[in-house]
Image: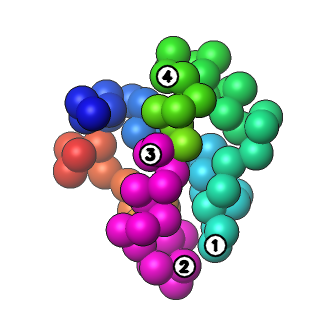
């Protein structure tokens, strides 16, 4: 899967931040992200799955708050 654009990652992370620590997108989140980015449901869900696997529940809020687009 190709890398996401920095702007897409920033929007996804802003949308996910209120969902800490579970970091599961709601149906409304998916619709919002799709409308803003053009990504489809499967891409968004896959991104979320990778995020949850990569970071522990205790790390997730810090990672989402400390996002720097230049680090992607």
Left or right for 2, reference 36: left
The reply to whether the C-beta atoms of the residues labelled 1 and 4 are less than 8 Å apart is no
Alpha carbon of mark 3 to alpha carbon of mark 4: how far? 11 Å
Query: Quick one: SS at disc 2?
Result: helix
Instruction: Give the residue pinned by disc 2.
Output: 57
* Residue plotted at (55% across, 43% down): 45
Left or right for 25, reference 1: right
Q: Which residues are magenta?
A: 46-62
Alpha carbon of mark 1 to alpha carbon of mark 3: how far? 16 Å
Instruction: Give the residue pinned by disc 1.
Output: 21
In the image, residue 53 lies at what x, y percent? 42, 68
Query: Quick one: SS at disc 3?
Result: helix
Residue 36 to residue 8: above or below? above
The reply to whether the C-beta atoms of the residues labelled 2 and 4 are less than 8 Å apart is no
* Residue plotted at (46% across, 44% down): 46
Q: Residues within 10 Å of mark 1 (few under 14, many from 20)?
A: some
* Residue plotted at (63% across, 17% down): 35
Instruction: Give the residue pinned by disc 4.
Output: 39
Residue 62 in view here: no
The answer to which of marks 1 and 4 sits earlier in the sequence is: 1
Query: Quick one: SS at disc 1?
Result: loop
Magenta-drawn stretch contains 60: yes
Q: Nearer the viewer, mark 1 or mark 4?
A: 4
Alpha carbon of mark 1 to alpha carbon of mark 4: how far? 23 Å
Marker disc for residue 47: 3
């Amino acid at each position: 899967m190709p890398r996401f654009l920095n702007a897409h990652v920033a929007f996804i992370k802003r949308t996910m931040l209120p969902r800490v620590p579970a970091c599961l997108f709601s149906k409304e989140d998916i619709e919002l992200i799709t409308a803003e980015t053009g990504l489809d449901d499967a891409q968004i869900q896959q991104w979320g799955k990778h995020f949850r696997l990569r970071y522990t529940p205790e790390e997730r809020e810090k990672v989402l708050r400390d996002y720097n687009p230049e680090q992607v």
